[in-house]
Amino acid sequence: MTDRTPLLHYRLSSSITDADRLRHAPGTGGRDGSQLRGSSSRTQTPQPQKLSTFFGVVIPTLLSMFSVVVFLRIGFAVGQSGLYQTIAMFIVAYIIIGMTVLSVCAISTNGALDAGGAYYMISRALGPEFGGSIGIMFFLANVCGSALFVLGLVESIMDTFGVPQGPEAGLGSSVQVLPRTYWWELLYGTSILLLCLLVCLVGAHIYAKATFIIFLIVLVALITIFISFFVVKPHEVTVPLLNGTGTTTANFTGFKLATLQENLMGGYTVDYTTGNMMSFATVFAVMFNGCTGIMAGSNMSGDLKTPSYSIPRGTITAVMFTYIIYNLLSVMVACSCDRLLLQRDYSFLRDINVWHPFVTVGVYSSTLSAAMSNLIGASRILYAMARDDLFGKVLAPAKMMSRSGNPWAAVLISWFLVQLVLFSGKLNTIAGIVAIFFMLVYAAVDLACLALEWASAPNFRPTFRYFTWHTCVLGIVGCGIMMFLINPIYASASIAFMLFLLVIIHYLSPTSSWGYISQALIFHQVRKYLLMLDVRKDHVKFWRPQVLLMVANPRSSVELIGFVNDIKKSGLYVLGHVELGDLDTLPSDPLQSRYDSWLTLVDKLNIKAFVNLTLADTIRHGVQQLLFISGLGGMRPNTMVLGFYDDCEPQDGLEEFAGIAMDTSLPVEEPRLNFPVLRRTAGRKALSMEDYVAVVSDSVKMLKNVALARYFSDFDRKEVLGRKAVFVDVWPLNLMRPDSINYVDTCSLFLLQLACVLTMVRSWRQARLRLFLCVESGRSVQGPEEKLRQLLRELRIKADIHTVAWDSVVALHWHKQAGRKPEEELELEEEDFVNSFPSNATRISDDYLQAINRMILQQASEPAVRFLYLPRPPADTSLYHTYLRHLDIMTKDLGPTLLIHGVTPVTSTHL
């Protein structure tokens, strides 16, 4: 197709955004801006003359709406339904398309449109899923519409030149020479379709240049029809009997009150062309096809002088003109033709015309142009979908184009499908399917406009403002109701097919750069609900973990990231990362380019998490920033998880994604996992021991629960959950303070709650909680055990309680060796006493900590993960190194372990 093509011309129109201009520029590619062949030469050739409102919108729309219906089915509607119901049908039909016209005008004046009609508007407004599924439906609607007009033309030819059948055999005129059987009519339809194919293959410009001539022919035919009602004298017209056994006569009476009264009410009977009983729904389906074609003008936006001016005014003018013509014809037909004539002769307008060939030429011209228009439109929609790669290689052949820019492959595919539809044989047979397809497309256009309006996006500001969300809803509801009134089976099947396509495209199509209206709607709703989420109304019984996981390098944290995703229990999950640097010394923010890699990681690991990156001079300051700013409103992290500070060699957990991380053959827009390669830890770490403990201390001061995760690089989730017996061990005692026997402090309850949350996850439901109660031989076991069991019952937590004698371990603690008693300790509040790191921590021996480590390891059946009590960091910063060394010795070689310190109440025993 060349630049001179004024109709159904397919080129990329420039968008109002700089990004779209760049994508549409010659030499650029991509899904949204794939250039057409010859685009470089387009910049060297003169721009084609732009079209006015009349030639660019009014004429294409009128020719699309005036076709077989105006000439062959007006009498059918009045004869079957009566004048009242016919007018009601047009009111309903034009309300539906009127609401859609308002939506089309709004969308088309919100930016430049490309060819593809409804597909382009919906795909760019609602995203590729809706756009692709509706695009297929719109394509099928045009395919079936082309077949419908070809069959209407064949029917008209048969009425004029077909050999009479049955009792009339041998009584035809000299021009009635064409055989009239199913296969002969199929041959005639195929020949007409071949003519349409040849025109479309040569180029749409041939049809475009003839549109005005065709419009004049149709207009002259309509004028002669109106004149004929006044100048033709009453006479009889021969019509066939219903059973095909003979003929009878019907009357053209001229304007008579009696004729009008006879035709006011409905009188449904059998359709003589199909043998099916007619009803309001079936007649409406046929009539609605005369109201389609309203989007012909919107497809011309690239060729119009002022699209935002022409599309609304031209489309509305054409719709109003056709509505007036249809109603005038209905009234005149009802006043001048008896019912028998209307029901038995669909081409009666030719028989009562002042000169019969006028109607014949009008029918042939309008129907042929409409058939070609639908064939061309279907091919352009198919090409647009193929170019956007929504269906991958399935539609790849449709991308092929001629040197002049004509998508000949898409034309051939469309022609083949139209040919298949021609096997249906009769116009009225496929009229219902075509009407349902078009109404589904119209409903989707209304939905697109409604979504844009409800999203309240600042960039949705169409120059056409004569619409509201009420008109969109009315259009959607009207289309939905009429679809099911016409044929509930076809309507249900069409919707199911569209939803099937939507799911397929959602999972198989690559990410587009068009923008997703769903994101705008989600933002709109989330903002509203976040404002309603009042932190002052928080209650402990609705508590859930909201986790900030600090990640240095995702390569060494893959298993931990997946595990924390399990314990979040539908709560907030944020992956935090601190990049060292000073923005003052950098030309731009280095973090912006790294978000894609992190978000790709989230997708590849199939976790539900947000990503928050920050730039700071130290890791500690960066973590403080994230603790202060992560989350929004009532959704803020209440728990921070850190990897343990040790000298273990990191393991690359992203090796299975190595192809994505390293493959340089991927297109630029394909996201990659570009994370630093892991280094050996012999070098200097970015975080010192003191700063690491200070980060833990800072979190506690900010009233955040803290969890330190160790050995999760050895955690194999698939292997662990595949075991016959899966255990989760909980040690609720502060093992560094054996002189405390209080098991119900806040930190202990937090351990229990977090372990219970883990077992509530679907994949962990087979896991059993084991609660270890450390006792000394000199004290009663039943009291603390019964107290703990009662607590578990009140908290509705199922766990096995195991008592562990640890006399030999406690004997190594300093207070036993010094002969001190618990009551001789410094007078601290009980819970602070339990939570705190011992003030005389230097007196805790390594032998005691190693004994604790051995005691934990000696418990039968290796657990999947261990939950241990984490004491609060000491207030004295000089003890930070000792604090961390004690934790290291106590948890050495324990396997996946969480050291947890809870600061907020998280359990409730009340409703």
Image (cartoon, rainbow, N blue to C red):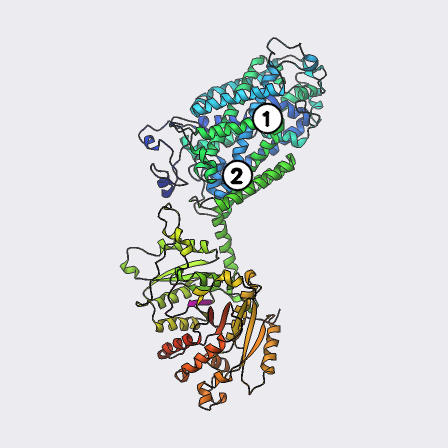
Q: Residue at x 39, y 79 (%)?
A: 875
Q: What residue type is labelled 1?
A: Phe
Q: Is residue 445 magenta?
A: no
Q: Locate residue 17, reporting x and y percent.
A: 38, 42
Left or right relative to 76: residue 410: left
Q: Which amino acid does label 2 sit on?
A: Ile
Highlighted magenta segment, given as a residue range? 639-654
Question: Quick check: can you spot residue 568?
Answer: no
Q: Quadrant of the C terminus?
A: bottom right
Q: Does the magenta stretch include residue 642?
A: yes
Q: Locate residue 775, reporting x and y percent.
A: 54, 82
Q: Locate residue 881, reporting x and y percent.
A: 36, 77
Closer to us: 807 or 824: 807
Closer to us: 202 or 284: 202
The residue mark sitting in front, 2 or 1, is 1
Q: Eyeballing the image, is 866 above or below 575?
A: below
User: Looking at this rendering, what residue extends furthest in the bottom direction?
Assistant: 819
**Residue 134 — which label?**
2
Secondary structure beneath disc 1? helix
Residue under pointer 1: 423
Q: Eyeballing the image, is 678 above or below 498?
A: below
Secondary structure beneath disc 2? helix
Count of numbered marks: 2
Q: Eyeballing the image, is 126 above or below 38?
A: below
